[in-house]
């Protein structure tokens, strides 16, 4: 099956700094990637859809300037949390478009802002 | 309006027993797909099973089966002969519309399953 690699798996950063999370499709080309956020004991909430070669599509209520998404190539999508604050601490996970009947997820990134 | 509803926040089951995790959904699109994912404490999302809206038979994958009742808009996951390693969070999810590279998946609130030895 398709493999999606997400890096880093965990990160601790100081309040006010920016953090970049990478999501790579290893054995296929992805024109689209999805980014989710999951708070503890809650469900996955779709934040945005990254589109190769064009602007990302953000879900309602997600701050575009806060969560910068770039889809630089057919194998790489990045999410940058800018000027991070403790309330941004969460689990972020990307997924590749559905191939046949399955969506493939990265391993996830646990972000802690102190 | 919530599209995927999982009414069981948590469940405890004795090892080797079968367990059913409930999921109901809401959509007006005749074409859709339903998924179940398992999320252990590590956070990774493990795909379990898929059911397409036009599939005539209920999906099965090893110990997992999906009880698809289209008229009732329910897609319950059945795990037979539960094992200790089945303890995890389980999410029901849905894709609306025909598959495309832009197809989004939305998730239910999840059910935490705990298997007792």
Image (cartoon, coloured by chain):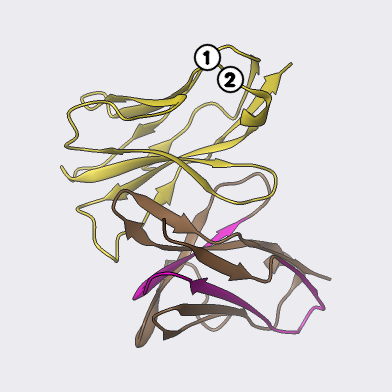
Q: How many marks?
A: 2
* Chain letter of disc 2 in the image: B
Mark 2 residue element: loop
Magenta stretch: residue A30 in it? yes
Please indicate whether residue A7 sits to the left or right of residue A63 in the image. right
Please indicate whether residue A22 sits to the left or right of residue B99 in the image. right
In the rendering, what colour is chain B? yellow
Residue occupied by mark 1: B18
In the rendering, what colour is chain A? brown
Of mark 1 and mark 2, the one earlier in the sequence is: 1
Where are the magenta residues, as a range?
A: A10-38
In this view, B72 is above or below A44: above
Q: Is residue B1 among what the camera can see?
A: no
Q: Is residue B98 among what the camera can see?
A: yes
Secondary structure predominantly adopted by residues drawn in magenta:
strand
Where residue B86 appears, as percent x and y from the top left, is 61, 29
- Judging depth in this view, the residue of B43 and A54 nearest the camera is B43
* Chain letter of disc 1 in the image: B
Residue occupied by mark 2: B82
> Do labels 1 and 2 touch, CB within 8 Å?
yes
Where residue B114 appears, as percent x and y from the top left, is 67, 25
**Quadrant of the rendered structure where residue B94 is?**
top left
């Amino acid at each position: 099956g398709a493999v999606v690699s997400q890096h880093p798996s965990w990160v601790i950063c100081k309040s006010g700094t920016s953090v970049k999370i990478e999501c790579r499709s290893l054995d296929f080309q992805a024109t689209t990637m999805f980014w989710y956020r999951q708070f503890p004991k809650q469900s996955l909430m779709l934040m945005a859809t990254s589109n190769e070669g064009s602007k990302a599509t953000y879900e309602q209520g997600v701050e575009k300037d806060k969560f910068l998404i770039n889809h630089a190539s057919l194998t790489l999508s990045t999410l940058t949390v800018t000027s991070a604050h403790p309330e941004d601490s969460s689990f972020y996970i990307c997924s590749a478009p559905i191939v046949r009947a399955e969506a493939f997820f990265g391993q996830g990134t646990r972000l802690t802002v102190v | 309006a919530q599209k995927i509803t999982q009414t069981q926040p948590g469940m405890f089951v004795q090892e080797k027993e079968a367990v059913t995790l409930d999921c109901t959904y809401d959509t007006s699109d005749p074409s859709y797909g339903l998924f179940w994912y398992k999320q252990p404490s590590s956070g990774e999302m493990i795909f379990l099973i898929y059911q397409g809206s036009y599939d005539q038979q209920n999906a099965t994958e090893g110990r997992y089966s999906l009880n698809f009742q289209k008229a009732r808009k329910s897609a319950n996951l059945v795990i037979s002969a539960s094992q200790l390693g089945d303890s995890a969070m389980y999410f029901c999810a849905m894709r609306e519309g025909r598959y495309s590279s832009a197809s989004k998946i939305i998730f239910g609130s999840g059910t935490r399953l705990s298997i007792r030895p």
